[in-house]
Image: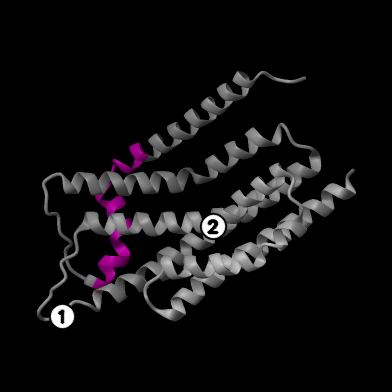
């Protein structure tokens, strides 16, 4: 039986409300020790500076603390967001489509968790150490907490965007009925686009640009493989 549009819209609002409530509860928990939440975020930089960071405005400490609590609240609520997305989509899917969606969300969650771990324990300390090398006797670096927090957030959103690209494009291709062969025909454009993104999103150093560009192109191949798996399963279940 077909449901009216506003019934789906009301369900979406309720799920968004539950997710927002979970983020708010995480924020309330972090208020028990706001400095601890802030230190978790600035730890990769503090390890290399081994000294106090700066607040240059009376409200900067509050803003930085709230920003850190918001980041941690989203991270701890991430599994609930995945669950609500799966619950909202699964009711309109066939059994084999539910299995494919479950597998995709499992892979996305695993990649996100692994990617954030590598980002927090490897990439972020490496970039902090690299940036601190520019400090010298005539230009002493005095890092501001809020500036670092914005840097952390931009870096994190870039990672999230990088991980979500193939999954978003996959759903768009499925909705538009694109066959894998038509997407494979865009391989040359994918190489060019990946090279441009590698040059725009990385420091002016050729090896880093090539590595990031190769990462984007690898996601294109993952997208093509996922479309072939989906298309073969769809044909076999007809």
Label located before the other in sequence (1 or 2): 1
* Residue with the mark numbered 2: 163
Q: Which region shows up in magenta?
A: 27-48
The percent coordinates of residue 131 (x first, y second) are 28, 73
x, y percent for residue 115: 51, 62
- Residue sitting at 88 percent across and 45 percent down? 237
> Badge 2, how many Cα within 10 Å: few under 14, some, many 20+?
some
Residue at 80% in and 52% down: 231
Q: Is residue 41 magenta?
A: yes
Direction from residue 154 to residue 63 in the image, left or right:
left
Q: Residue at x 73, y 55 (%)?
A: 227
Looking at the image, which is closer to me, 220 or 164? 220
Position of residue 201 in the picture relative to residue 182 (left or right): left
Residue 120 counted in the magenta span: no
The residue that disc 1 covers is: 136
Q: Residue at x 31, y 76 (%)?
A: 130
**Magenta stretch: helix, strand or loop mostly:** helix
């Amino acid at each position: 039986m077909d449901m009216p549009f506003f019934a789906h819209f009301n369900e979406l609002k309720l799920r968004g409300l539950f997710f927002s409530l979970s983020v708010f509860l995480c924020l309330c928990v972090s208020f028990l020790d706001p400095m601890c939440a802030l230190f978790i975020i600035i730890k990769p930089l503090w390890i290399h500076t081994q000294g106090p960071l700066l607040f240059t405005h009376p409200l900067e400490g509050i803003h930085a603390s709230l920003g850190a609590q918001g980041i941690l609240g989203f991270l701890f609520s991430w599994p609930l967001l995945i669950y609500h997305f799966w619950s909202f989509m699964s009711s309109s899917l066939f059994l084999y489509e539910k299995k494919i969606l479950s597998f995709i969300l499992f892979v996305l969650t695993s990649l996100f968790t692994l990617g954030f771990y590598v980002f927090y324990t490897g990439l972020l300390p490496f970039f902090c150490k690299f940036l601190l090398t520019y400090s010298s006797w005539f230009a002493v670096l005095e890092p501001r907490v809020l500036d670092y927090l914005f840097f952390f957030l931009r870096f994190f959103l870039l990672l999230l965007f990088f991980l979500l690209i193939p999954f978003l494009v996959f759903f768009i291709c499925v909705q538009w009925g694109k066959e894998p062969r038509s997407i494979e025909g865009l391989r040359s454009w994918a190489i060019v686009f990946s090279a441009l993104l590698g040059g725009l999103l990385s420091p002016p150093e050729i090896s880093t640009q090539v590595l990031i560009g190769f990462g984007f192109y690898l996601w294109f191949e993952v997208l093509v493989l996922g479309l072939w798996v989906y298309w073969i399963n769809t044909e076999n279940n007809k």
